Image (cartoon, rainbow, N blue to C red):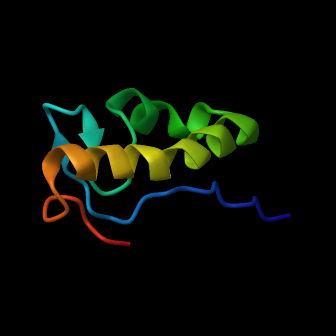
Amino acid sequence: MAETPIKTPCVKVCFVDPAAGLCVGCFRTLEELGRWTKYSDAERETLLAALPQREAAYAARSGPAKAPTR
């Protein structure tokens, strides 16, 4: 039986803004990136729900030109 792939917000634009401590492709922290496969489905869903707010906050601080569009 095949395993179900792990849901991920990765858009293959991997650049961590050191000032923000976030990947500006998916808006996860370094810790979240490193632990993503170890999180439970519920933990990943909780983080996925928080990412749009992080993206909006990052765009507000940095200007929309620095935040990638999805």
> Which residue occupies the extreme front position in the image?
60
Q: Is residue 27 visible?
A: no
Q: Quadrant of the N terminus?
A: bottom right
Q: Is residue 21 left or right of residue 46?
A: left
Depth check: give the residue in front, 42 or 38: 42
Instruction: Give the vertical position of 45 relative to 64 (above or below).
Output: above
Instruction: Give the vertical position of 9 relative to 31 (above or below).
Output: below
Report x, y in % for residue 62.
15, 48
| Residue found 67% across the figure and 45% down from its top | 45
Q: Is residue 6 left or right of residue 22?
A: right
Instruction: Give the vertical position of 40 relative to 26 (above or below).
Output: above
| Residue found 24% across the figure and 31% down from its top | 21
Report x, y in % for residue 47.
57, 40
Depth check: give the residue in front, 16 or 66: 66
Q: Is residue 58 visible?
A: yes
Can you tell which quarter of the image residue 32 is in?
top left
Q: Quadrant of the C terminus?
A: bottom left
| Residue found 74% across the figure and 60% down from its top | 4
Q: Is residue 69 left or right of residue 2?
A: left
Q: Is residue 36 left or right of residue 55?
A: right
